[in-house]
Image: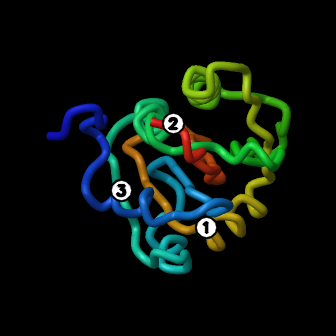
């Protein structure tokens, strides 16, 4: 345990978050996502895990991880097949955590299922959560920490 760091963030996840640079993508997915095969194609090349609900994992990650303010797609969600405008409860919960972490409304863009898979393959890494609800899949583009930040 470390002071000031959410205990959900294990050593492997912390190392990956620290190693990522501006513009790198982090993918956080549910238990049904093809996580292992996708993660093998990422920069990190291996799957990371945090066995907790998606919203809890996103809250922990965003306590350390800055979102990219230079792009419109820094926070994204996988669209429901055939219902691209529907937002299920798991995505609403994650949206609340994004807004809380950023201190303002920061709407996620939606990404079609197969386009999301392609974005995930090009990402820095994939974290599979213990989320069992469908469409608990998200992408976060890393921003910068200014020199005067604590």
As drawn, 73 above or below 88: below
Residue 18 position, x and y percent, is: 42, 59
Give the side of residue 85 with respect to residue 130, left or right. right
Residue 8 position, x and y percent, is: 29, 40
Give the side of residue 48 with respect to residue 95, left or right. left
User: Around disc 1, counting alpha carbons within 10 Å, would you say few (fewer than 14), some (14 to 19), or many (20 or more)?
Assistant: many
Q: Quadrant of the C terminus?
A: top left
- Residue assigned mark 3: 13
Query: Which residue sits furthest front?
Result: 148
Q: Nearer the viewer, residue 96 or 141?
A: 141
Total marks drawn? Answer: 3
| Local SS, label 1 | loop
- Residue assigned mark 2: 133
Q: Nearer the viewer, residue 150 or 85?
A: 150
| Lower sequence index among marks 3 and 1 | 3
- Residue assigned mark 1: 123
User: Label for residue 64?
Assistant: none
| Local SS, label 2 | loop
Residue drawn at point x = 57 percent, y = 20 percent: 100
Q: Quadrant of the N terminus?
A: top left
Distance of mark 3 from mark 1, alpha carbons?
Answer: 14 Å
Residue drawn at point x = 84 percent, y = 39 percent: 84
Q: Nearer the viewer, residue 40 or 19?
A: 19
User: Around disc 3, counting alpha carbons within 10 Å, would you say few (fewer than 14), some (14 to 19), or many (20 or more)?
Assistant: some
Distance of mark 1 from mark 2, alpha carbons?
Answer: 23 Å
Residue 55 position, x and y percent, is: 48, 31
Which circle, 3 or 2, is nearer the viewer? 3
As drawn, 50 above or below 58: below
């Amino acid at each position: 345990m470390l002071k000031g760091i959410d205990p959900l963030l294990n050593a492997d996840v912390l190392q990956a978050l620290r190693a990522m640079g501006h513009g790198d993508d982090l993918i956080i997915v549910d238990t049904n996502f093809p996580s292992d095969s996708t993660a093998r194609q990422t920069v990190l090349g291996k799957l990371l895990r945090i066995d907790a609900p998606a919203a809890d994992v996103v809250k922990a990650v965003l306590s350390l991880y800055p979102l990219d303010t230079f792009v419109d797609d820094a926070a994204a969600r996988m669209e429901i097949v055939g219902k691209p405008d529907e937002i299920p409860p798991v995505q609403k919960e994650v949206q609340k955590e994004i807004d809380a972490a950023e201190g303002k409304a920061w709407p996620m863009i939606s990404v079609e299922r197969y386009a999301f898979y392609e974005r995930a393959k090009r990402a820095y890494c994939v974290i599979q959560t213990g989320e069992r609800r469908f469409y608990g899949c998200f992408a976060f583009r890393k921003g910068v920490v200014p020199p005067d930040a604590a």
